[in-house]
């Protein structure tokens, strides 16, 4: 199995992003996703900046994929989406189906992000027929579900045409909204947010009345309060999953890459922290930590 590094979901300063990817270039990561997927107002890096980083990562031997926005709300965002799709060099991850017509027109293969709902074999086959060659499974689905869908005859017949990836580390993206909850938490209007989310490099925690963390606010994206971690489920993924995705964290991401690599065969299990979960993959409630 390969290790993929998803796009940075939080709003980091440009210098921090560039420094992070310099370290990624020297790491054991196999595949890297680049791009802003949450909020179009986050413009610390332009497409040209991401292309420069993409070239550096490719020269370091990494597979590179440009990730597109998940929620498209304005004509300017569609124009930016078209630029990503027409980059001419790197594969594109479609996080909104609006990207797919551009990619089909170009006749290029593409990746399908976890935010696009694929809940049955017929939908999956439809995307394969459109040119999908890499599929990130929806966040909340289980190992049993994935096994069953890949065993369907119409999928088995094209199984060699695409790779399957599972989100395996990080706070789970649960929802996107037209409103910016980080701005609202500071009593700001969305149009006058002053990009306040840059103050929260790992999102803003939301706790319940009994002081339990239940969500993380990340601009218009709401994430799980608990960090998802499937490091101890890696042995059971062998033969089923082609790559596992880790979501970049402000600190320690590449240490986790090493831990994942070391436990591919189950020889180096890790005791999960109290605030980590693995429930969805085990067909349990998402907040549950089992095994």
Image (cartoon, rainbow, N blue to C red):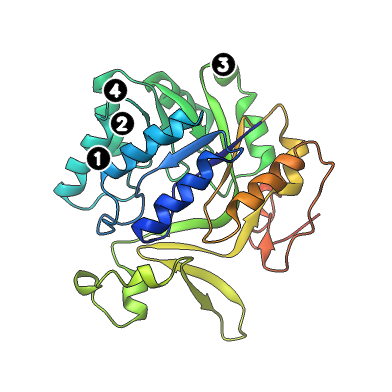
Residue at 36% in and 28% down? 90
Left or right for 191, reference 118 = left
Estimate the x, y position of residue 125 in percent, counting from the top left: 47, 23
Q: Which residue is mark 1?
A: 81
CA separation in Å, label 3 and label 4: 20 Å
Question: Marks 3 and 4: CB-CB under 8 Å?
Answer: no
Q: Which residue is mark 2?
A: 100
Q: Earlier in the sequence, mark 1 or mark 4?
A: 1
CA separation in Å, label 1 and label 4: 14 Å
Which quarter of the figure has residue 267?
top right
Q: Earlier in the sequence, mark 2 or mark 3?
A: 2
User: Hey, which residue is sitting farthest left in the picture?
Assistant: 75
Question: Marks 4 and 2: CB-CB under 8 Å?
Answer: yes
Q: Nearer the viewer, mark 1 or mark 4?
A: 1
Graded by Cα atoms within 10 Å as few (under 14), some (14 to 19) or many (20 or more), the crowding at tag 3 reads few
User: Hey, which residue is sitting farthest right in the picture?
Assistant: 267
Residue 160 is labelled as 3
Please name whichever residue, 15 or 48, is drawn nearer the observer in this view of the structure: 15
Q: Does dot 1 land on a helix, a strand or a loop?
A: helix
């Amino acid at each position: 199995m390969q290790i993929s590094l998803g796009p940075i979901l939080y709003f980091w300063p440009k210098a921090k992003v560039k420094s992070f990817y310099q370290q990624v270039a020297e790491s054991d990561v196999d595949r890297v996703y680049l791009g802003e997927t949450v909020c179009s107002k986050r413009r610390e890096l332009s497409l040209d900046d991401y292309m420069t980083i993409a070239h550096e990562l490719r020269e370091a031997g990494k597979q590179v994929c440009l990730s597109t926005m998940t929620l498209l709300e304005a004509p300017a965002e569609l124009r930016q989406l078209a630029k990503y799709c027409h980059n001419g060099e790197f594969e594109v991850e479609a996080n909104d189906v609006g990207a797919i017509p551009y990619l089909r027109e170009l006749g290029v293969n593409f990746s399908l992000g976890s935010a696009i709902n694929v809940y049955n074999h017929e939908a999956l086959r439809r995307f394969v027929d459109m040119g999908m060659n890499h599929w990130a499974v929806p966040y909340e689905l289980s190992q049993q579900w994935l096994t069953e869908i890949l065993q369907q005859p119409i999928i088995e017949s094209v199984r060699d045409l695409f790779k399957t990836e599972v989100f395996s580390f990080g706070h789970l993206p649960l929802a996107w909204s037209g409103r910016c909850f980080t701005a609202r938490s500071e009593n700001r209007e969305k149009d006058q947010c002053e990009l306040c989310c840059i103050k929260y490099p790992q999102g803003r925690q939301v706790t319940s009345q009994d002081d339990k963390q239940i969500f993380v606010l990340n601009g218009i994206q709401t994430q799980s309060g608990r960090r998802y971690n499937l490091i101890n489920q890696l042995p059971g993924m062998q033969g089923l999953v082609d790559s596992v995705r880790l979501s970049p964290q402000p600190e320690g991401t590449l240490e986790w890459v090493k831990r994942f690599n070391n436990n591919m065969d189950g020889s180096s299990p890790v005791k999960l922290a109290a605030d980590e979960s693995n429930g969805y993959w085990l067909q349990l409630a998402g907040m549950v930590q089992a095994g």
